[in-house]
Image (cartoon, rainbow, N blue to C red):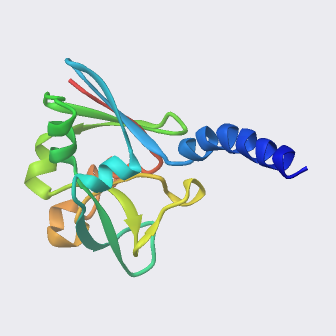
Amino acid sequence: MRLLASVIFAVLAVFAAPALAQDVPSVTVTGSSGSVTFDRNQLEAMGLVSIKTSTPWNEGVVNFEGVPMALLLEKAKAQGSTATVIALNDYSVDIPTSDFTKFGTILAVKRNGAYMPIDDQGPFFVMYPFDSNPILQGQPYHGRAVWQVKAISVK
């Protein structure tokens, strides 16, 4: 009986492992050299930086942690002047890649120390340091802060 229970447990573990691996969200970055998909663990391994800022969508000052967009594109070997950021609902916006170094834009993976759920702006959010520069406190920059990011295409 114990042997049968052990076999059943082993079989269930084999089938459950891929399902658990799929629970880690990922983002695909596409450039002229091809596509690279990074899961959240790989993004965090690149090194997270913090932006503390107010936003039109959150109350008070929020601490966002994420990967600098310039570093993400470098790791993906994606070069170009425009990054089209695509959300899970297929909303997309073109962002000049110069924004990433000029303003220190990040792909946030955490808000106030916690991962963002899909139903609350997650899993990834393009974030600008809105409070750091008056030019960022309106359009077009608010429209470039895309949440629920699933893909980035650089041209």
- Is 77 in front, or is 118? 77
The C terminus, quarter of image: top left
Count of labels shown? 0
144 over 52 or under it: above or below: above
Q: Nearer the viewer, residue 25 or 55?
A: 25
In the displayed structure, 66 sits above or below 77; it is: below
Q: Nearer the viewer, residue 49 or 84?
A: 49
Place of residue 111 in the rendered image (x, y in percent of width and height, measured from the top left): 41, 69
Q: Residue furthest bottom?
A: 60
Left or right: residue 113 versus residue 137 is right
Q: Horizontal and vertical percent for residue 8?
A: 81, 43
Is 135 displayed left or right of 16 in the figure? left
Residue at the far right: name it.
Answer: 1
On the question of residue 9 being in view, the answer is yes
Query: What residue is shown at x 55% (from left), y 60% (from top)?
Result: 120
Give x and y (percent) for residue 67: 25, 54
Residue 112 picture location, percent across and down: 40, 75
Say which residue appears at 8% left-offset and 53% top-offset: 102
In the rendered view, would you say 113 is above or below 119?
below
Give the vertical position of 24 relative to 113 (above or below): above
The foreground one among 13 and 93 is 13
Side of 39 where 88 appears, left or right:
right
Residue 107 visible, this angle: no
Q: Residue at x 55, y 38 (%)?
A: 89
Quadrant of residue 57 within the rendered picture: bottom left
**Where on the picture, by quarter, is residue 51?**
bottom left
Q: Residue at x 13, y 57 (%)?
A: 103
